[in-house]
Image (spheres, rainbow, N blue to C red):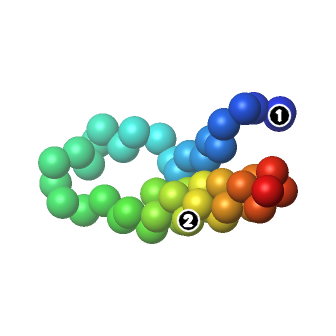
Amino acid sequence: LGLPIVRTSPDHGTAFDIAGQGVADAGSMKAAIRLAVQMARARMKRKG
């Protein structure tokens, strides 16, 4: 996309139907954060 920033997101919506119930799975969010870290490190390595 050519964005000037690293941007990732989880593969789900807001899940308002389960908000506050303590049943959400953070796996997708964790994966998005790990990917963002990898992308940022790769970008920094390319730029020197």
Give me the disc on residue 34: 2
Task: Describe residue 48's horizontal placement relative to residue 34 as left or right.
Answer: right
Residue at image location 61% in from the left, 47% down from the top? 8
Give me the disc on residue 24: none
Residue at image location 72% in from the left, 32% down from the top? 4
Q: Count every numbered label the image shows and give the total.
A: 2
Q: Secondary structure at mark 1?
A: loop
Q: Residues within 10 Å of mark 1 (few under 14, many from 20)?
A: few
Point out the image quarter for the N terminus: top right
- Please identify the residue farthest to the front as the structure is shown: 48
Q: Quadrant of residue 25?
A: bottom left
Task: Describe residue 39's horizontal placement relative to residue 13 as left or right.
Answer: right
**Residue 21: x %, y % from top left:** 16, 54
**Residue 31: x %, y % from top left:** 54, 65
Q: Indicate whether 28 appears above or below 16.
A: below
Residue at image location 23% in from the left, 45% down from the top? 19
Could you tell me if residue 39 is visible in this image?
A: no
Point out the image quarter for the C terminus: bottom right
Q: Secondary structure at mark 2?
A: helix
Task: Describe residue 3's horizontal placement relative to residue 12 as left or right.
Answer: right
Residue at image location 72% in from the left, 55% down from the top? 44
Give me the disc on residue 1: 1
